[in-house]
Structure formats: C-alpha cells, structure tokens
Amino acid sequence: MELTDDGSPAMFTLDITPTTLTVRYERWTRLYVRRARTDIPLAAIREVVPVARPLAQAKGLRAGIVVSGVLKAGTWTGFDGVRRLVCARRGEPGLRIVLDRRIDGVDELVLSLAGAEDVRRRLAGAAA
C-alpha cells in the first residue's frame, strides 16, 4: 500500500501518458468508488481547476464513504445532475477535472493530491 507524505494510506495513483489520464484506485478506495481505475482521454478534458478544499466539492446524493470533515470517496450526483467521482481528504489541495462528456459514468473528477499544481500543468501541456 502506498502512503502519502503524512503517512496516511494513498487513495489513488495517477499516470499521464500522451493520450490518457489513468487514475488507479488503491484497494481500500475501490470499495467506495466501485472501480479499479478510470481512464480519461486527454482530449475529453475540458477544464482542470485547482481547488483549495476538495472536500467541499462533493455535494448532493452520494454512493461512497464520508468521514465528516476528514475524507470523502465515491460518486456524488449534484442537484444539477453532474456526477462527480471524489477522492478527497482534509489538508490536501486538489483538482476538479471537468470532462466534455460523461465517461465511465462521471462528468467530473475531484481528487486531492499534494502536487496538484504540477499535475494541472502536466495535463494542460499534454492536452495542448
């Protein structure tokens, strides 16, 4: 099991290739996001937005886990119909990745990660 900088279990790993963003979920996270991985074609990424508090992005009806104020993992369907796959924890910045169409049952990904700004730049460069 991979660990984050603070020693807590990682929720996922990212792999960015010239054509695809792949999110591989850790074993414990798979129970809540109901998948082992998500593959997003870079051409399908409409926008990558840095978010200071990714936990706040998960609103609406959920299928997943909430440890109030600490952790959220699963899918949230907002009252506007937008489905967000969320893997977020307190104290880490994150990214909201908006897709141009529904892929693997979701419209957006909300991910907490320590190197959020670096990943945002890499995705912007790869999609250009």
Image: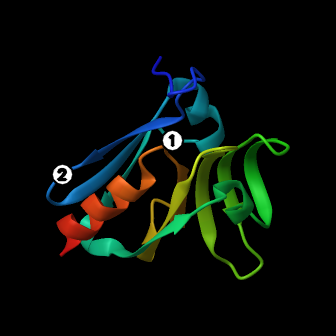
Residue where numbered disc 1 is placed: 35
Label 2: how many residues lie within 10 Å, few (<14), some (14-19) or many (20+)? few
Picture coordinates of residue 118 (x, y %)? Answer: 34, 54
Q: Is residue 19 left or right of residue 94?
A: left
Q: Is residue 21 left or right of residue 87?
A: left
Q: What amino acid type is highlighted by mark number 2? A: Thr
Label 2 to label 1: alpha-carbon separation: 20 Å
Contact? badges 2 and 1 (CB < 8 Å): no
Picture coordinates of residue 12 (x, y %)? Answer: 47, 37
Quadrant of res 121: bottom left
- The answer to whether residue 68 is seen in the rendering is yes
How is this picture coloured? rainbow
- The answer to whether residue 41 is seen in the rendering is no
Picture coordinates of residue 17 (x, y %)? Answer: 18, 51
Picture coordinates of residue 46 (x, y %)? Answer: 38, 79
Quadrant of res 85: bottom right
| 70 vs 106: above or below | above
Looking at the rendered image, the quarter that the C terminus falls into is bottom left
Residue where numbered disc 2 is placed: 17
- Mark 1: which secondary structure? loop
| 85 vs 30: above or below | below
Q: Please identify, in this view, whether the residue under mark 2 or under mark 1 is nearer the observer.
A: 2
Residue in the picture at 49% in, 45% down: 113
Residue in the picture at 56% in, 34% down: 30
Residue placed farthest to the left in the image? 18
Residue in the picture at 14% in, 58% down: 18
- Mark 2: which secondary structure? loop
Q: Which mark is residue 80?
A: none
Q: What amino acid type is highlighted by mark number 1? A: Arg
